[in-house]
Image (tube, coloured by chain):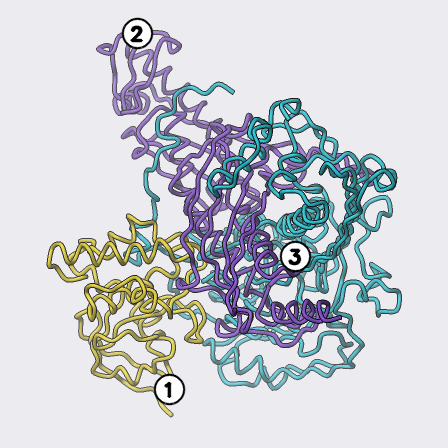
Chain colours: A cyan, B yellow, C purple
């Protein structure tokens, strides 16, 4: 595309808030001070899977400095929710505060609001919950084996159901079985990633401040202020106009601050007490309660010709969603849509499943669904190269997608520059490419 | 245990504050004195975002009992800008993009100041060691190390103090 | 020999914007009586420099100095809707919304300037330094500040603009997966050299080189900041990080930075990067998203390098010393058997 000469776009003009950072003058959500501010701490499930027999909050209520205790009975609107319900994703499966059952260790049950963080913490520790433990399931394949306990009635076999009763986010392009039949080599492997914490330096948190006009201002470090406001209003059954969500600079996000984890209960506490309420995750909560990057298990099977052309790729992926859905169905759709990576393969088959386990719910992190795909594909490419005895650079260049190619999701490729990027990297690495590989371009497959 | 009055000097100003039993220096600095450059990234002594100088020594204010700071001279990041002029160490952070979200920056600058105060010409390894108690999730540390190197160079060029 | 070296690389692509689109961002821009501009957004700056980048884009489109742009963010009372800061979407989505708002504001500005200069707005151009003049006649000029004063106090006009960028939602066929998932694709290729201690299982990343293709860069220093920070995070993901070291077991469960391991400054190698620019048709001035893809190349490149060094086949992350030693044991057992 022709571009008129640019002025300030493309120039290094510094970064606007760096001096403020260096002077310590940047205001984060918790750098506002309100008199008589209360603090909220959560009593959380000690069991990964159990029926709740009894919840006794009397000792917590009597604890010094405790102002208010909230259970599911105090929720004025929804008892269960999903953040994407407004755009038609469902069912709403996650309790705001657990009532009949807990499905992961750390699930919130009772909110305790105190005059100080210490008073709230001490009060929360005095909540008594009697559990009837249930067998748990922690492995994605075991969860779907048919022998595992079902986490909820929504998904009898512990996996998400996509529209039209599909068990997976699917790609069906060409005929992989025919591709395997014609291939000179079959290359298969299994890949596994781990749950990873976004670990922003600033943990999730907010301060809900009631105003004289009946509105509540929420100072929050969410990555999405409208999304957090509208979900909070929906959960509590409030008119959205009652809420003003105010962010600023966030102390790191990486996908870890999109869950609307702290705002609804803080707003409810502020409404009940008429006072500002702060709910800040401890580092312990950030590590084990806040949702992680999902762990993924992938099985990849490739059909490859002697000359290096990959003619079929079949991928089965399991995204470990933990106990609830959150944004996992989106993540698996993005994962499936990304396949088979930056390569043109005529036959592609993908099943990407969201699987529920008794683990902390997982969610987005930097490269949602794609990081695990890239990890597995690029390890697979090395295995293919080794199997057929081909230079791994040439293997990638030969198969790299070109502009005008139809991708597995049937969109015709545009803005591709994978070939040029690999060629430049080979130069940077001092890896010699044969002349015909140097002559390849993303705009002309015939050049190869 | 009862609330207690303690006196200390913070950024050159004499302060008298009432503290609760087991209050940390971080509580006093952030909540009582509203010196919000002092961050609280973990409360476990694991991230360094709350770092301050106590009588010139680098301390994690989240693990320091306020009581132990009685009579001490405490410096937070705000204390570096007594005249409102940005100091060379801070300028080096700006020029080297040594911050993104900025949450670790106050602790990082204080750790760097503590290092340069005792060793004005540190090697790269000494800088890495001097910052080893401070985490950053955004920058990959390389720009921070470069900033401290540049600050050290600027100091040796001008003979000025770090901050 | 206890220490062995290996190299590995990985090629990755990354989609810009939320999968399947349907993720709007809006922007409002208005001129103040003094002639500067306020860009109002609900987008959230996570430290990546969103406010800087949007100010650059606004200045470019308006044709006024970068310094005259204020960017306000993250307030649901004042900021028009933004879906949020994720999915490598803000430069593209918010950037496009700012371009649209700035075009409308620029049109209003040139209309007032045209009245002052007794010329048609189409015949006017901005010099980027705060002046508007008749094309080819630099001396027939008026300052942006004069235009602002005239608009506010002479004509009673607003100089303002609205922008709304939406990639319309694409359905995904549940059977075939047919869809239009993204606005554009960015690309990267990362090469690493590692040294593995075969006795301790410890891995050192000695060197990391990357080439990125991210469309037109709006601010190259900030792009580099993402690449370097992501290279470090990639090392963390590849070698150290997990909230469940016994996955799928839920214990042990690290709750602090002593047990949730990340690389420190001493584990960070020299990172070299080169950036190619193939402007995207749909991007603001051709920009693509870079914020997320920066961990995706380093992770497989590191694991490929470890496999290359040891001649083993490790297919999981994190590649802890235990994983390395187990892989070496298996290799020995196979060689022996």
**Circle 3 marks a residue in which chain?**
A
**Circle 1 marks a residue in which chain?**
B
Q: Nearer the viewer, residue A6 or C295?
A: C295
The CA distance from mark 1 to mark 3 is: 39 Å
- Residue at 43% of width from left, 64% of height from top? C264
**How many other residues sit within 10 Å of disc 2, few (<14), some (14-19) or many (≥20)?**
few
The CA distance from mark 1 to mark 2 is: 75 Å
| Residue A84 visible somewhere in the drawing | no
- Residue A16 horizontal/vertical position (percent): 34, 44
The quadrant of the rendering that contains the C terminus of chain A is: top right
- Residue at 26% of width from left, 57% of height from top? B149
Circles 1 and 3: CB atoms closer than 8 Å:
no
Report the residue marked by disc 1.
Answer: B21
Report the residue marked by disc 2.
Answer: C118
In the image: residue A148, left or right of residue B26: right
- Vertical position of residue C5 compared to residue C186: above or below: below
Q: Nearer the viewer, residue C154 or C326?
A: C326
- Residue A412 horizontal/vertical position (percent): 69, 27
In which quarter of the view is residue C81 placed?
top right
Check the image and name the residue furthest to the bottom: B1
Q: Which mark is residue A406?
A: none
- Vertical position of residue C146 compared to residue B43: above or below: above
Check disc 2 and report its element: helix, strand or loop. loop
Q: Tell me, yes or no, whether dots 2 and 3 are on the same chain.
A: no
In the image: residue B37, left or right of residue A53: left
Check disc 3 and report its element: helix, strand or loop. helix
């Amino acid at each position: 595309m022709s571009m008129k000469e640019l002025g300030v776009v493309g120039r290094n003009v510094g970064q606007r808030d760096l001096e403020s950072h260096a002077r310590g003058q940047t205001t984060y959500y918790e750098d506002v001070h309100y008199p008589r501010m209360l603090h909220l701490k959560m009593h959380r499930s000690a069991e990964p899977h159990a029926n709740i027999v009894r919840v006794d909050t009397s000792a917590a209520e009597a604890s010094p400095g405790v102002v208010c205790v909230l259970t599911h009975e105090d929720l004025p609107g929804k008892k269960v929710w999903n953040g994407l319900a407004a755009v038609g994703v469902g069912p709403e499966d996650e309790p705001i505060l657990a009532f009949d059952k807990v499905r992961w260790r750390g699930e919130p049950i009772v909110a305790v609001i105190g005059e100080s963080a210490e008073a709230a913490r001490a009060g929360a520790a005095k909540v008594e919950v009697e559990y009837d433990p249930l067998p748990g399931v922690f492995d994605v394949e075991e969860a779907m084996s048919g022998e595992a306990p079902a986490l909820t009635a929504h998904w009898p076999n512990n996996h998400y159901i996509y529209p039209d009763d599909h068990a997976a986010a699917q790609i069906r392009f060409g005929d992989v079985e025919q591709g395997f039949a014609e291939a000179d080599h079959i290359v298969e492997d299994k890949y596994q990633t781990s749950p990873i914490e976004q670990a922003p330096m600033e943990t999730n948190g907010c301060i809900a401040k009631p105003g004289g006009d009946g509105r509540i201002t929420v100072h929050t470090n969410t990555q999405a202020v409208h999304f957090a406001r509208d979900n909070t209003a929906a959960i509590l059954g409030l008119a959205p106009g009652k809420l003003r969500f105010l962010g600023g600079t966030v102390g790191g996000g990486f996908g870890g601050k999109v869950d609307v984890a702290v705002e609804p209960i803080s707003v409810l506490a502020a409404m009940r007490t008429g006072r500002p309420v702060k709910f800040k995750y401890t580092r312990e909560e950030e590590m084990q309660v806040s949702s992680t990057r999902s762990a993924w298990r992938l099985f990849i099977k490739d059909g490859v010709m002697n000359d290096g052309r990959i003619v079929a790729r079949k991928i089965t992926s399991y995204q470990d969603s933990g106990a609830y859905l959150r944004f996992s169905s989106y993540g698996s759709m993005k994962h499936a849509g990304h396949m088979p990576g930056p390569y043109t393969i005529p036959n592609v088959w993908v099943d990407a499943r969201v699987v529920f386990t008794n683990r902390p719910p997982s969610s987005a992190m930097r490269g949602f669904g794609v990081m695990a795909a890239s990890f597995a594909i690029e390890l697979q490419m090395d295995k293919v190269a080794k199997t057929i005895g081909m230079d791994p650079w040439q293997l990638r260049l030969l198969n790299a997608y070109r502009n005008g190619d139809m991708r597995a999701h049937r969109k015709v490729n545009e803005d591709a520059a994978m070939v040029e990027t690999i060629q430049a990297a080979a130069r940077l690495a001092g890896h010699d490419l044969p002349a015909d590989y140097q002559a390849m371009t993303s705009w002309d497959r015939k050049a190869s | 245990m009862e609330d207690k009055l303690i006196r200390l000097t913070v950024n050159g100003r004499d302060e008298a504050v009432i503290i609760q039993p087991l209050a940390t220096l971080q509580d006093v600095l952030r909540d009582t004195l509203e010196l919000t450059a002092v961050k609280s990234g973990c409360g476990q002594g694991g991230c360094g975002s709350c770092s301050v100088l106590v009588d010139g020594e680098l301390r994690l204010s989240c693990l320091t009992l306020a009581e132990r700071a009685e009579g001490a001279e405490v410096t937070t990041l705000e204390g570096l800008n007594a005249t409102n002029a940005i100091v060379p160490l801070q300028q080096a952070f700006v020029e080297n993009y040594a911050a993104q979200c900025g949450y670790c920056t106050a602790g990082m600058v204080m750790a760097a100041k503590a290092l340069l105060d005792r060793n004005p010409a540190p090697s790269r390894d000494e800088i890495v060691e001097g910052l080893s108690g401070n985490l950053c999730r955004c920058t990959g540390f390389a720009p921070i190390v470069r900033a401290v190197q540049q600050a050290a160079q600027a100091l040796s060029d001008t003979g000025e103090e770090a901050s | 020999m206890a220490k062995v070296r290996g190299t590995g690389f990985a090629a990755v692509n990354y989609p810009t914007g939320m999968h399947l689109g349907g993720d709007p961002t809006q922007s409002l821009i208005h001129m103040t009586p003094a002639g500067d501009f306020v860009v109002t957004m609900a987008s959230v700056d996570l430290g990546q420099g969103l406010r800087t980048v949007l100010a650059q884009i606004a200045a470019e489109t308006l044709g006024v100095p970068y310094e005259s742009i204020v960017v306000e963010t993250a307030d649901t009372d004042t900021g028009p809707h933004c879906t949020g800061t994720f999915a490598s979407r803000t430069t593209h989505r918010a950037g496009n919304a700012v371009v649209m708002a700035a075009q409308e504001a620029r049109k209003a500005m040139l209309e007032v300037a045209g009245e002052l200069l007794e010329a048609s707005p189409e015949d006017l151009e901005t010099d980027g330094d705060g002046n508007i003049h008749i094309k080819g006649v630099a001396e027939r000029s008026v300052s942006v500040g004069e235009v602002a004063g005239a608009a506010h106090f002479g004509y009673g006009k607003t100089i303002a603009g609205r922008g709304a960028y939406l990639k319309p939602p694409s359905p995904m066929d549940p059977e075939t997966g047919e869809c239009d998932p993204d606005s554009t694709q960015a690309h990267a290729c990362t090469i690493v050299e590692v040294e593995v201690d075969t006795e301790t299982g410890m891995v050192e990343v000695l060197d990391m080189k990357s080439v990125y293709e991210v469309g037109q860069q709006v601010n190259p220093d900030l792009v580099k900041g993402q690449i370097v920070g992501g290279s470090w995070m990639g090392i963390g993901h590849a070698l150290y990080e997990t909230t469940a070291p016994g996955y799928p077991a839920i214990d042990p469960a690290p709750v602090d930075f002593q047990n949730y391991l990340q690389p420190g400054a001493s584990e960070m190698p020299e990172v070299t990067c080169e950036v190619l620019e193939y402007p995207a048709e749909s991007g603001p001035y051709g920009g693509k998203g870079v914020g997320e893809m920066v961990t995706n190349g380093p992770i497989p490149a590191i694991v490929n390098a470890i496999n290359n060094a040891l001649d083993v086949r490790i297919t999981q992350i994190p590649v802890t010393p235990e994983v390395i030693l187990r892989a070496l044991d298996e290799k020995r057992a196979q060689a022996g058997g």
